[in-house]
Image (spheres, grey):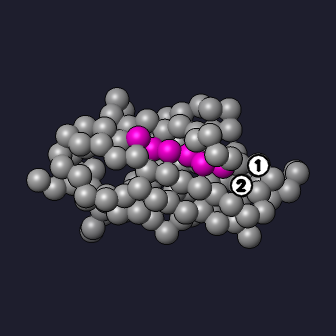
Amino acid sequence: QVQVVESGGGLVQPGGSLRLSCAASGRIYSITAVGWYRQAPGKEREFVARITSGDNTNYADSVKGRFTISRGSAKNTVYLQMNSLKFEDAADYYCHALVKTFAGSYDINYWGKGTLVTVSS
């Protein structure tokens, strides 16, 4: 089994910064990609950012230039650096990992339980 755990959420003022962490553990042969998604109250979950095993990244237009996704020094850890936060960035942020559990296996989707980001003055 694979576990995906997010951390780093909290309360921040508009214009402030937060860094979210996503750590995957368990039966992992390799990770194809890690993505961040968010869901605000009353809204659907939306894509935020993604990084592949080849370090290709892509971002939602709403966060380009403000958010950066990167790999951590610890194995199977990914960060989301969020700068210039806006009221509309407030949401539960979820980490998603595409994982191969053994050589040649299909990618399996794993989700964390989320971490809450609140933007308030």
Task: Mark 1 and mark 2 in contact? Answer it, CB < 8 Å.
Answer: yes
Figure quadrant of the N terminus:
bottom right
Q: Which mark is residue 30?
A: 1
* Residue 46 percent across, percent down from the top left: 40, 54
Residue 97, by quadrant, is bottom right
Q: Is residue 94 visible?
A: no
SS class of the residue under badge 1? strand
Name the kind of residue labelled 2 in the image.
Answer: Val
Q: Name the residue furthest right.
A: 103
Q: Which mark is residue 99?
A: 2
Please provide the residue range marked out in magenta: 76-81
Residue sitting at x 64%, y 66% = 3
Question: Badge 1 local density, few (<14 within 10 Å), some, or many (20+)?
Answer: some
Question: Badge 2 local density, few (<14 within 10 Å), some, or many (20+)?
Answer: many
* Residue 72 percent across, percent down from the top left: 58, 41
- Give the vertical position of 56 relative to 25 (above or below): above
Q: Which mark is residue 22?
A: none
Magenta span main SS: strand
Q: Is residue 3 visible?
A: yes
Residue sitting at x 27%, y 68% = 42
Name the kind of residue labelled 1 in the image.
Answer: Ser
SS class of the residue under badge 2? strand
Let me know if residue 118 is in the magenta part. no
Residue 112, by quadrant, is bottom right
Spatial separation of the CA atoms under disc 1 and disc 2: 6 Å
Residue sitting at x 68%, y 38% = 53
Q: Earlier in the sequence, mark 1 or mark 2?
A: 1
